[in-house]
Image (cartoon, grey):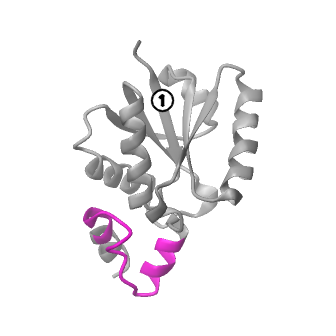
Amino acid sequence: MKLTAVYPGTFDPITNGHIDIARRAADMFSHLIVGIAGSERKGPLFSLEQRVEMAKEVLADVPNIEVRPFKGLLATNMKEWGSDVIVRGLRAISDFEYEVQLAEVNKQIDHNLETVFIAASNKYTFLSSSIVRDIATNDGDVSDFVHPVVASAFARQLR
């Protein structure tokens, strides 16, 4: 059975933790869509186009991953994409509370949607995009936390 799952997020920027979750999810599903949310209200550092391009570059070696931008409700996009499975990564217990709320809201919007949680690998439990952005915007070295493509994008963006 072919099953498409969607791993949604702002990915501002995509971190090594996100990449780990995406690769592991790609092993579980026949097709994985990494959905990059517009999320203009969050005031992302990178444009939607930049975030999509970075994700495409760092995940290019995984043949069953497709990167797509989206705006609006995830549930609406899920229907258009032909998927009922949402993949979410969990780093800590604080993530769990928020993610369960989000899963339930999505289920209320569309009762066919199911959320699958993947626990972050130990080496990424502390890692978040906001932490990486803070390090980078304060002239810190992010090379241990992001793919070289993303580190280069920070260097260009923050000149």
Question: Which residue is rendered at x = 34% and y = 73% of the image?
Answer: 144
What amino acid is labelled 1 in the image?
A: Ala
Q: Position of residue 134 (x, y in %)?
A: 51, 78
Question: Which residue is rendered at x = 63% and y = 27% of the image?
Answer: 114
The residue sitting at the front extreme is 122
Q: Position of residue 16 (x, y in %)?
A: 38, 60
Q: Which residues are magenta?
A: 131-151
Question: Which residue is rendered at x = 52% and y = 73% of the image?
Answer: 131
Question: Which residue is rendered at x = 43% and y = 61% of the image?
Answer: 13
Magenta-drawn stretch contains 1: no
Q: Position of residue 63 (x, y in %)?
A: 25, 34
Residue 97 located left or right of residue 138: right
Quadrant for the N terminus in the image? top left
The residue labelled by disc 1 is 5
Quadrant for the C terminus in the image? bottom left
Judge whether residue 104 can be spotted in this image: yes
Residue 77 located left or right of residue 18: right
Pick the residue in front: 8 or 27. Answer: 27
Vertical placement of 155 versus 106: above or below? Answer: below
Locate residue 50: give its quadrant: bottom left
Vertical placement of 139 versus 89: above or below? Answer: below
Judged from the image, the secondary structure of the residue bearing numbered disc 1 is strand
